[in-house]
Image (cartoon, rainbow, N blue to C red):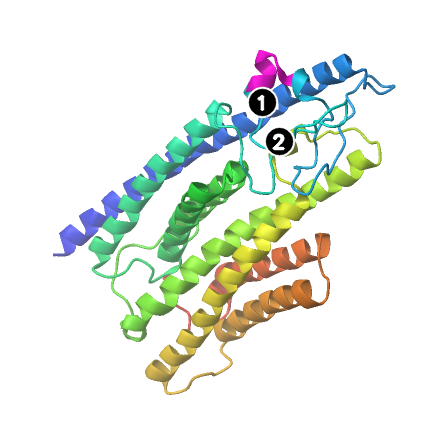
Amino acid sequence: MFPLNETMGQYSELFMLLAAGTYTVAFIAFAWDLAKSSKVLRAVDIRAAELAGQVTTNGAARVPVGVGAGTAGGDIERSDADLSGPAGRAERPTSALSGRGAAAGAVRTADAGMRYAGERRAPARAAVALTVLGAAIHAAGVITRAFGAGRVPWGNMYEFLTTGAFVAVAVFLLVLIRRDLRFLGTFVIGLAIIMLVAASIAFWTPVGHLVPALQSYWLIIHVSIAVISSALFTLTFAMSALQLVQAHRQKTVAAGGADRLGFMRLVPSALSLENLSYRINAIAFVGWTFTLMFGAIWAEKAWGRFWGWDTKEVWTFVIWVVYAGYLHARATRGWTGTRAAWLSIVGYLCVVFNFAIVNQFFNGLHSYSGL
């Protein structure tokens, strides 16, 4: 039986390597999409500005920010007639505003619903297809690891990280069904690649049995919810980081500065990012609450007490407090904008610290890193 387990573990590692390679190609495609779309958008802006006579003294197109509630933060003021050419049709989003006059037809590259024109961004469609392929290969790696270990594949840091990366990508793909979040692809896939590389280099652990304390059905309940919540926090971390960049860009352009981040035209406004991040954080917070509760119940079953101020328990609670503070501050204290984004980022950094630092350098009852 042992050779079979070892063989399945080897297959799992091969699948993880293939998944990382596929994700890398998808990452390049997403990045290419951002670069290519940014270049085309800038060309369309200059052409439209020349037609409308809206060229600034330095020869750059005037690209106002924040036109309408759901703008992406970099919309050129031009009429629908300016988009009659091939370039205009290729870049025209579904959310174009109709109107008369030079300033009446402001076009959004990404609206509050995060919808984009289906006729453009071929590299992004290819990147999504590659991501789906990578996720399928990644799933095979997780499943073969489970068969090799004869249990659920999240009994140590290597397994938690590889499974967490898969869940993050899977959640991203599922959300794509309802909302066009392809602008997040570069960041989510980039994080998934980092997680897989870190798992293979820093946290690799051979297939093996669990210690007695982990041989419980609570492992499936407690850790699976923690993995899903961490994956959602990963998405909101990427959104919050983009929100900070978009907010700075919007402020700079609104003040008359040059738009040096053209690719952010494909990203919704800072407000839209903040609202979606807040809703996803609320769902992830509920999951983390159950993680904390079920962990306490499992601790009582394993060690005869619900809470023992173990380092892992403390940091799990710290994460809960940070995100609870984020939700409360934003909902009742008016902590919006960059302050909310920074608080969300701090929460995710606590998640990373809890996983990467506490598991390795703090001794306690939760020292199950497998290293």
Image coordinates of residue 252 in percent, x first then y, are: 79, 37
Q: Quadrant of the N terminus?
A: bottom left
What label sits on residue 91 in the rendered view? 1
Tell me, yes or no, whether the highlighted magenta stretch contains residue 175. Answer: no
Question: Which comes before the other along the chain, label 1 or label 2?
Answer: 1
User: In percent of the image, x 71 and y 14: which residue is there?
Assistant: 47
- Give SS at disc 1: helix
Give the residue displayed 62% in from the left and 29% down from the top: 96
Residue type of the residue flagged with mark 1: Glu
**Dot 2: within a 10 Å radius of its alpha carbon, few (fewer than 14), some, or many (20 or more) residues?**
many
Can you say whether 125 is above or below 88 in the image?
A: below
The correct choice, above or below, for 118 with respect to 287 in the image is: above
34 sits to left or right of 165: right
Instruction: Find disc 2 in the rendering and name its residue.
Output: 109
Q: Which residues are magenta?
A: 83-89
Residue 227 visible? The answer is yes
Give the CA separation, mark 1 to mark 2.
8 Å
The C terminus lies in which quarter of the figure?
bottom left
Q: State the residue lying farthest toward the bottom.
A: 304
Q: How many marks?
A: 2
Indicate the position of residue 256 as horizontal and vertical percent values: 84, 32
Q: Residue at x 32, y 72 (%)?
A: 218
Can residue 357 be seen here? no
Name the kind of residue labelled 2 in the image. Thr
